[in-house]
Image (tube, rainbow, N blue to C red):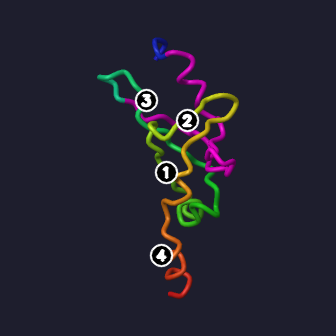
Amino acid sequence: MDDIPQEITSLVGREVYSNNGVFVGEVEDLRLNVDGEAVTGLALAKLNGELFAEEARSGQGIIVPYRWVRAVGDVILINDVVERVRDPDEEEDELLA
């Protein structure tokens, strides 16, 4: 594990926001392509309960494809696609059930 660049391991624990400023979650782990030596996804925990109510309630995390990452700094910015992952009509149906 010593040969993994410090830059990659330093992603763990960083907060993730959509590029329009909505908190998504916190990086808990990384999904790696060992053969290609590349990060392919970010495993997020401590999720925004408004975006991921079911996962946040059950303590599950999500994996965000690394291709969604737009910027890495003190926080990680991703495309706002994540805000459209859930269909609002689907959530409404769950509330009525």
Vertical relation: 33 (above or below) 59: above
Disc with the residue nearer the chain's start (3 vs 1): 3
Residue at horizontal 46%, vertical 12%?
Answer: 3
Amino acid type of the residue tagged 2 in the rendering: Arg
Disc with the residue nearer the chain's start (2 vs 4): 2
Secondary structure of residue under mark 1 = strand
Between 71 and 94, the one nearer to me in the picture? 71
Q: Which mark is residue 70?
A: 2
Amino acid type of the residue tagged 1 in the rendering: Ile
Q: Residue 41's spot in the image, x, y percent?
A: 44, 38
Q: Residue 15's spot in the image, x, y percent?
A: 66, 40
Eye-nearest disc, 4 or 3: 4
Q: Residue 81's spot in the image, x, y percent?
A: 51, 52
Secondary structure of residue under mark 4 = helix
Secondary structure of residue under mark 3 = strand
Question: What residue is shown with label 1?
Answer: 62
Q: Quadrant of residue 11?
A: top right
In the rendered image, residue 19 lying in the magenta stretch gets the answer yes
**Separation of marks 2 and 1 at Cα, in angstroms:** 18 Å
Question: What residue is shown with label 4?
Answer: 90
Q: Which mark is residue 71?
A: none
